[in-house]
Amino acid sequence: MQKNKIKYHPKILKLFAKDELDTLAEKAFHSVDDDGFVNIIVVCTDKISVEIFVSSEEHALIERLDSEKVPNRLTKEEFWDIFSRSKAQEIRCVVID
C-alpha cells in the first residue's frame, strides 16, 4: 500500500503523527481493519521488534515482541529512542496467532 493512501486508525494517530507513521510504514508490516484503517503495525529492527496496536484504551499501545532488555510496554519516547539507534529490518512474513 502506498504511504499516501494509508489510513491510520484514529487511536494510532493520537500517539504518532502521520509523518512519523509514514516513516515507519516504509519497513513495517501493517494490518487493516474492516473499515480500511491500519490498526496494527509491526516494526522490527536489529535491536527490537514491537507491535503498535489499537486497544481499548484511549490511544494505541506499543508492546515489545522480543528483547528482554526493555519493558514489555514502551512509551512513544522509549520507542523512538531505541528506533533511532537501530537499523530497521524489512519484514517478510508475519504469523498472527
Image: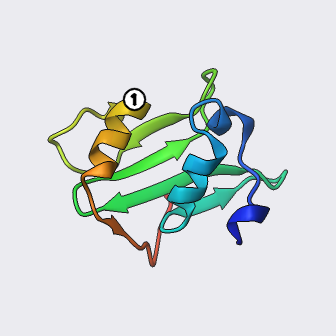
Left or right of 87, for residue 14: right
Q: In this view, which residue lies farthest toward the left?
A: 69
**Number of numbered discs:** 1
Residue 87 in the image: x percent, y percent?
A: 29, 64
Residue that protrudes farthest toward the top in the picture: 58
Q: Residue at x 53, y 58 (%)?
A: 23
Q: Nearer the viewer, residue 1 or 81?
A: 81
Mark 1, residue position: 75
- Left or right of 90 on screen, residue 57: right
Most foreground residue, 35 or 1: 1
Say if residue 74 shows up in the picture: no
Residue at (43%, 57%) from the top-left corner?
A: 43
Residue 83 at x, y = what percent? 33, 50
Quarter that holds the N terminus:
bottom right
Q: Residue at x 36, y 40 (%)?
A: 79
| Residue 70, above or below 8 | above
Q: Residue at x 51, y 57 (%)?
A: 24
Instruction: Please indicate whether residue 17 sits to the left or right of residue 50 in the image.
Output: right
What secondary structure is marked by label 1?
loop
